[in-house]
Amino acid sequence: MELDKQIEAILFWKGEPMTLADLCRALKAPSDEVKKALHILSEKLQGRGIAIIQTEEEIALATAPIARELIERVLKEELSKDLSKAALETLSIILYKGSLSRREIEYIRGVNSTTILRSLSLRGLVERTQSKIDERQFLYRGAVELYALLGITKAEDLPEFAAVQKELNAVNLESEGTLSPEDGESSEEVASETLHE
């Protein structure tokens, strides 16, 4: 597979910006070759619905500027809809667990959560911050607007906060091999239901 196609595949799969260094590591290719391949890919995507977006530090696959009006219309329609069950589960995990990465959220949910996290970010319900431990990683946390909408001032004010947090921490321990999965309701279901109440 040509390098430009590999870049397209990685950026699409990743679903979030990557640095040039990260791309080079993933592709096991020198930066000058990756830059050339990015240029080729950008040219191939001319006039298409997606484009390569590059800032000083990051590279991403995103909707093309020519699709701006279409995306704005679809986004307005999307934001006017109620949150899906999957979105509520994701939101509940973030609220009860605190700042955590996309991978941690996906481990707890058991499914890819990139699209849901993007939707929640666009709605202003979650915030994405850079991890202090690993600068290549982003963490998601509940936005101030979300706390205001829920009528709470801190996470501890959420219903059954201690019990749900214990369930979510048990999931983390299972991933480390220190606990075996327990029968009964999953932690994301518990969190989602208590948030609904």
Image (cartoon, helix red, strand yellow):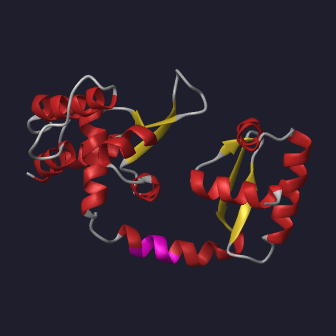
Work out whether residue 141 can be spotted.
no
Work out whether residue 62 can be spotted.
yes
Residue 126 counted in the magenta span: no
**Percent coordinates x, y for residue 133 in the rendering:** 52, 21
Position of 21 compared to 112: left or right? right
Residue 43's place in the image compared with 132, above or below, is: below
Q: Locate the N terminus by quadrant.
A: bottom right
Position of 121 compared to 164: left or right? right
**Percent coordinates x, y for residue 83 in the rendering:** 28, 63
Residue at 38 percent across and 67 percent down: it is 79
For this rendering, which residue is in front, 65 or 46? 46
Residue 92's place in the image compared with 120, above or below, is: above
Residue 74 counted in the magenta span: yes
**Percent coordinates x, y for residue 114 in the rendering:** 46, 54
SS assignment for the magenta stretch, majority: helix
Q: Which residues are magenta?
A: 73-77
Residue at 35 percent across and 49 percent down: it is 125
For this rendering, which residue is in front, 103 or 55? 103
Residue at 72 percent across and 65 percent down: it is 51
